[in-house]
Every structure is written in C-alpha cells, then in structure tokens.
Image (tube, grey):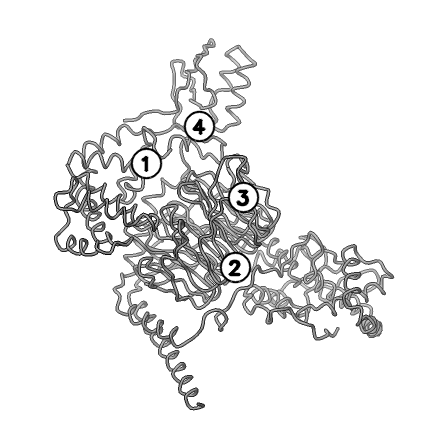
Amino acid sequence: MASDGLHESETLAALRSEAESLKGKLEEERAKLHDVELRQVAERVEALGQFVMKTRRTLKGHGNKVLCMDWCRDKRRIVSSSQDGKVIVWDSFTTNKEHAVTMPCTWVMACAYAPSGCAIACGGLDNKCSVYPLTFDKNENMAAKKKSVAMHTNYLSACSFTNSDMQILTASGDGTCALWDVESGQLLQSFHGHGADVLCLDLAPSETGNTFVSGGCDKKAMVWDMRSGQCVQAFETHESDINSVRYYPSGDAFASGSDDATCRLYDLRADREVAIYSKESIIFGASSVDFSLSGRLLFAGYNDYTINVWDVLKGVRVSILFGHENRVSTLRVSPDGTAFCSGSWDHTLRVWA
Amino acid sequence: MAMTSGSGTPGGRPRAQRPHLSKMERVVVSMQDPDQGVRMRSQRLLITVISHAVTGGDVVEWLAQKFCISEEEALHLGDLLAQHGYLYPLREPHSLALRPDETPYRFQTPYFWTSTLWPAAELDYAIYLTKKNIRKQGALLEHEKEHYDQLHKKINHTWDLVVMQAREQLRAAKQRRKGDRLVIACQEQTYWLVNRPPPGAPNVLEQGPERGSCTGSRVQMSSDFYKREIEFSRKALGRTRVKSSICLEAYLKFSSQHSLHDPILSGCLPSNPWITDDDSYWTINAPMVAVPTKLRVERWAFSFQELLDDPVGRTHFMDFLQTEFSAENLSFWEACEELRFGGQAQIPDLVDAVYQQFLAPGAARWVNIDSRTMERTLEGLRQPHRYVLDDAQLHIYMLMKKDSYPRFLKSDMYKGLLGEAVIPLEAKRRFVHLVVLIMRLLVPAGKIFARLAEPESSPPTRAFFRGTGIPTVCSPYLQTRRTYRPASFEITSTTGLFLAQK
C-alpha cells in the first residue's frame, strides 16, 4: 500500500538522521580529551638529519603492472602479483626468480607470504583467495597443488595470513572482510560494516590482540574484533577512498593512505585522528603506507610515481624518492626494517635502503 | 569543436571520485592568474603569433616557488600536469612532456579538461582522425593509421556521417584566424593524446578495476545498516578514552627507545645487506643464533611481547622459568597460541591435549589459574572452540608479564646474556675490500698493501690495532686460514667479525 511505503521511507530517513546526530555527539566526546597536538609534543624531539635512500635492487620480470607484494619472514624473499595474472616469488637479494605461477584471472590485487615461508596466497578479479604451497621440486607444477580458500562476491582487494599458515584474513570489493580456515576453506568469521568496497587490511601486533583494521571506499577505517566479528572502533576523517592501512609498531595507532592525497595517523586509545601528513604539492592519492621499525618514519607510495618519506612525530616530509615510471601501487618495509620494497605499474619492483 | 553525444562507456557513469583532477585544475587556474600566475608571453611560431604562452622553464620555476619544493619535484609535477593534458606544447605536440627550458606551452581550455570525463566516443575519434587524414593528406602516425582502419571497419555504416562532419569542421575552422586555428588544433590533439595514448605512453586515465562508491552500489543502505551504525555510536559514546597528551607521549617514548634498533634510521652493524651486498647481518641475527647481538638482547627488556616474539629470547625465558619451577606457564601459553591459530580440524584434539596436560586435576603440568577463570574455562571445554582458552591464556600471560618477566630482567641469567652478547664490527664498503683483496693477490710486497689498508678518513670507529700501530680491519672478504705476514704488519685470519665487549 502507498501509505506503508511512505512510512518505511520516513523511518529510513529518521534512522539516518539519528545515526548522523549520534556521530556528531561522538565527535564532540572525542574532542574533549584532545588537549595537545602531536606537532607540539614533538617539538622536543630532534629533527631528522639529511636522508639518503636509493634503489638497491630492481626486480624486472613482470610483464604488466605490479599490484601487490609481501615479504617473507626470512627478510629477503618476496612475493609479487600483477595485472596479467602472474605471481612471482623472488629472492630479492640476488634478484633471482624462484617460483612463478599464472593465475586464471587478471588483476591479482592481493598476495601474501605465509609465516612459515612455505606457501603464498593470492587473489583478485576471480573473487577468490587461493593458497599455493611452494615446492622446490622442479618437476612439480605449482598450480597443481592450488587450494581455493576464500570466496567473495566481488574482487579480492587484500589478504593476509594470521600468525600461522592455517588462517587467512581477506578483504573484498563486496564490502566485507572474512577469516578463513585454510585447510578446509571454512568461513570462520565475517565482518560487515563497511558501506562500500574494502580495499585494505592490517593485523594488529598487539600482545593479547585479536584485532585488525580495514579501510574502504566509504572513507572509513574500521577496527574489528576477530573473535566476535564486531567493529570496535571506526574513524571517518578521510575525504576519499582509503587505499592502505598499517599499524604503528607498538600497536597503539595506525596510519592510512588515501586518494585524498593525505596520510593520517589514528590513535586507538585516544580514539581519534592525531596527525595528517599532507603537502600542497602532493596532489595524487597515496596508494600504500608502511612504518619503519621504530615508527619514526612513514613511507608512502603515491599515484604520482613518487615515494614520500614522512617524519611521523613532526609531521613533515623528510624526503621524496623518484625512480618509478608509473604509479606506485604497493609498498612494504622488510621484516627486520633494513629496507622497503615498492611495486609499481611500471612493471618493476624496487628495494630501497 | 562540438563533441557528438558519445555512446558512453559500457557500465554507466564515469567514476565520480578523481580528487587529483580537481586539485590539478586548481593549480592550473592559479598558474593563469594575471598577477600571481606564470609569466605569459606571446610566442612566435613561423608566421603567426600565439598569445598567452608560457615557457616550460617558467612553469617549473613557478611551481618550485609556490609549493616550496625542489626544481626536480617541480619538474615532476609540471610533467604530470602536461601528461594529463592541462598543458600542451605549441610546437607539434606528439608527446605531452614538460621541458624545463624555452619550449613554449599553453594551458588547455577547460572544455577539454580531463575531469569533464567526456566518454571520448569512437565517433568523435573517427571524426578527428578523418580531419587529420584530410589535412595531412594521409600522413597519419602509425598507431593513428591502425585506429583509423579499425574504426573504418567498425562503424562503416556511419562513415558518410563521419566524413561529412570532418569536412564541415575543417571548413568552419578555415574561417578562423590562423593563430586560433593552430591553437584549436593543438588543444584537440592534446585531448586525444590523453584519451588515446600512443603505444608506449602511459595511460593516465586508467584507474584499475572499478570501485563501488558510497551512494548505493554494493551495500544496501537499509534500515539494518543504520540501526547498526546507531548501535555502534551508542557503544562508542560509552567507551573510555585516553587523553591525547598521554597517547602522544607514548609515541615519543617508543620511537626514541627503538631508534637505535631501526636500521633505516640508525644503520646496522656490520652493515646493511642491501647497501653493501654483504648478508652477514642476517647471519648474525638469524632466528636461532647461538650468541645474539647486544641490541637484540636489549630489546627483550622493552616489553614482554618483544621477549616472547624472539625465539632465542623465549628459549632463555623458558630456562629461567624452569629455575623458578613455573615453566608450565609458558608451555601452556604456547599451547593456547597453537589452538588460536591452528587449523579448524585440529581443535578438538588440541583442546583435549591441553586439558589433559595443564588443566585436569592432577595434571602433570598443572597451571595455577584463579578458581573463577578455571571454572569458566572448564565449563567452556564442553563445547570446545578456538577461543575457549582465551580467558585462561590471558590470565597466565598477565601472570608471567607482571611477575616472572620483571624478575627475569633483574636476574643474573639476563645480565649474563647481556654481557656475553656481541657487538658486530662495522664492515667497510665492499669496494675497498675488493681492492684490498686484489692487491693482496697481485702485490706480495707488504708496503704498498699497507698503504692501501689504511682506513678512510671517515668512520671506522671499531678497527682494532695490532702492534705496528697501523689499523687493520676484520672483514668477511678477507676470510682465509693463512696468516699473511708482510714486513710491516700482519693481518689476522678472520674466524668471525666479532669483538666481544664487556
């Protein structure tokens, strides 16, 4: 009946306005405890000196845009994936390719190295996340042992193993994240709450932690409890898609990189954004961010082909690195912090130190 | 130059969010400000004069000044503006690159701005190519010829329309002044260079797989969605927050504590493998190395988590717990971790094993948990799941953290480990070593060699001296069993890099 329809849309509008007003109250509450800016606190800290980082290795071999990469815990091997479906495992110290597999789909936007170093996971436009055990038997076809683990209803944007080879966390264009058991492919937990595609995730390093953060096209960064599937904290200050999220090494904060050309730092205990890393001359979106081991430096790869290095505490840019010839799509610091690796749409990966 | 209403891209609307385009436009607009903008001049091209031209060099200088950036960065930014079609070179633009010299450029008309995101339809492209074909009497570029032929086949049925439009536009153009004609041609050419980049040129319009946006595509903005948001906000309002000053102080403390342990910030000894191609750093910091480095042992004191994360640290902590007869706590914690992160199928067996070993009355390695937690845990064990031991695990973790861990740090065992820990010697750059090695093989006389072996004026703070007062440096490259004794000094054989320090 027509009157029912009217009633329903009124209720929807009423709900929306109540949601908005509560959000406003939340912002007010958060602001009450904000007694000082990071920049002020950081005045006591010595400024960083001249900073020189160069490309130490260039990994050539992908025939198309590199979309994602991850380090192995052995601090030298990496896995990378590209638009043409190729996933390659390199010993980046020697630049040798050790394994290669071609996925049956294009745009492999997510890849991850297993903690044991014995397997990799990847996925993209196939809406799945698959795990490939790494074998050194030359006769064995890597693709033969492929295990399909995750199933989403839209593209896979990010994936990560938890503390073991047996669980995988995924983020997808269908607006959800999910935790899977690798052996059986069983869905252990799903995480709903994003209003649009989820583009990135990172697991918390905290000691008793069972949480992770995700960022999406709804401009929100959300922190989840892995056990209950509930969102425990959310932050909505970016002006555009959040392409990358990464925890600060202590686990008390995380950084995000967005298409609005800024990177931001969010503190979990203060429950608010505490820093913005931006510059007028930086116009293009940040595609990926990562911290140095001490958390003093934030490396961010941008769609304008550059990498900017930020002083996390003082909020200023320390250095700009040129070298890539197309947008930087992925960036990770090595597990022992001796270098970081960037992957780009120019088909190459570079290791900087 | 009218655009025909294009067929549009399949799949509907162009992506609404391209914030970088509107930002570029703001820059371009301020570059054209009559007072504060880039210096405009009239550019002579053959026999015509084009007004409102700028040189590449001026553009770079303006950007460098306006944004307080280096010339290199300004050139990079200016080049991106050109690649996106906001600036075009006046002299026959085949490529949209910015040159930091006297090369003349002009700003693209807003009509053709990339942000308008015209569908750049096939029909329009066909008309453009046809015009060019007619004007240049068939001398199109290679890739343009290919496209032309393809389009001719594809939309053959409307080709009469194409040719007619092309001729009409050319005729209308002839009625304009030569200067205007040239400018319009450049503008149009730039537009097509952006929308149909030649092979090898980057496609600046490519965005990757389409993303949904907030306004309704993938997730339903239903009443459930809003109810969840309201629920979430209510909970969040009730949460305790910490003052910013306290949180931010924590960053300062963390960063300063860890700064010497950050290789990118402070370097690492003997050297960063990526810089010197020497992977000794990884060897001496291997996960289960016999003698850990001093920095590594120091890190165990930063937090309990750091100690547990390090396999060597954890092993020593286990040894310590054994002296206190509480090693079962750590073993229990490890078993719980295995359960939490293990495979789904292993859960029932693991839970049972943990119960038998640690929780059952009279168990061999019974852990001391408070009665309430024990009760809750045993209750939960009836329906074992991955998180069933969480409470017990947390209790034991806190016990170790607050009780055993501080005692460990004060213990003789830990102090001894700190004392025995090694500080690696700084290895010099590979090139110097290589030279030294080569000279050594070629020149038996010690004197020349001695001169070469003198350290560079900057750093090595850790070379050690032998007898003659000429510093020698231990190096992984001079690894040899023989000791070479030239007249004036000696090199010891290197069995390792390390200088144990009390």
Question: Observer-nearest residue: A49 or A200?
Answer: A200
- SS state under label 4: loop
Q: Estimate the x, y position of residue A318 in percent, counting from the top left.
A: 47, 49
Quadrant of the image for the C terminus of chain B?
top left
Residue type, mark 2 in image:
Gly
Q: Which residue is mark 2?
A: A285
Q: Which chain is indicated by disc 4?
A: B
Question: Observer-nearest residue: A82 or A58?
Answer: A82
Q: Is residue A314 visible?
A: no
Q: Estimate the x, y position of residue A178 in percent, counting from the top left.
A: 40, 58
Quick check: marks 1 and 2 in contact, CB under 8 Å? no
**Disc 3 with disc 4 on a shared chain:** no
Q: Which residue is mark 1?
A: B296
Q: For label 1, count other residues whose C-alpha is less than 10 Å away and answer few (under 14), some (14-19) or many (20+).
A: some
Q: Which residue is mark 3?
A: A88
* Cα–Cα gap, marks 2 and 3: 27 Å
- Kindly identify which numbered label has been placed on residue B427: 4
Vertical comparison of B268 with B444: above or below: below
Q: Is residue B136 visible?
A: yes
